[in-house]
Amino acid sequence: MLMRTDPFRELDRLAQQLTGTAGTWSRPTAMPMDAYREGDTYVIAFDLPGVPEDAIDVDVERNMLTVRAEKRPAAKADDVQMELSERPLGVFSRQVVLADTLDTERIEADYDAGVLTLRIPIAERAKPRKISIRSPRERKQIGG
C-alpha cells in the first residue's frame, strides 16, 4: 500500500551518529513508523515522543503523504548548561507514497502518548466486488 521514498535512511542515520551531527537543527530526520491494514482501513503510526501536537503538520498532495514535526529543546533559560544531550531535536520529516487504492480525502489523524496515528480508508473502487455474469438470453432481452 505504500513505498519508502528514502532507501538510504539507515545509512544516513549511521553517518549522523558517527559524525556527531545527529540531533542538530541542520536537516530533517525521518521518524520511525509502522504501517498495516486493519479491515477496510490502512493505518500508519509515527513515533513522535516529546513533540507537542501543535508542532506536527500532516499534508497530502495527490498520493504523497508528508508528516513534519519539530521537537524543540526543553531548557530555554540562558543560564542552563547542557551536560548530556542524546535525545534528537529539530525537524523530523517523513514522506510516504500512498497507493491509488486509498481514499486520501477521508484521512483521520489522532495523537496520543507521542504516537501520531493516521487512518486511511480503502477506496470503494478498490474493494473486491462480485461481478454478475449474464447469459446470452439476458443480453438479447436487454438489447445487447
Image (spheres, rainbow, N blue to C red):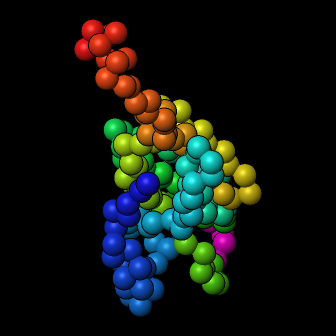
Q: Which residue appears at 42% of the width and 85% of the height?
A: 14
Can residue 128 be seen by looking at this rendering? Answer: yes
Magenta stretch holds residue 106: no
Query: Quick one: 3 or 117, which is closer to the camera?
Result: 3
Magenta span of residues: 76-81
* Residue that sits furthest to the left in the current view: 144
* Residue that sits furthest to the front in the current view: 137
Q: Quadrant of the C terminus?
A: top left
Q: Position of residue 143 (x, y in %)?
A: 27, 9
Q: Main secondary structure of the magenta part?
A: loop
Q: Which residue appears at 50% of the width and 74% of the height?
A: 23
Q: Position of residue 56 (x, y in %)?
A: 55, 48
Query: Quick one: 53 or 136, which is closer to the camera?
Result: 136
Position of 83 compared to 19: left or right?
right
- The number of numbered discs placed on residues in the rendered structure image is 0
* Residue that sits furthest to the right in the current view: 113
Q: Which residue appears at 59% of the width and 43% of the height?
A: 40
Position of 95 compared to 39: left or right?
left
Q: Quadrant of the N terminus?
A: bottom left
Query: Quick one: 34 or 87, which is closer to the camera?
Result: 34
Q: Position of residue 98 (x, y in %)?
A: 40, 49
Position of 139 compared to 68: left or right?
left
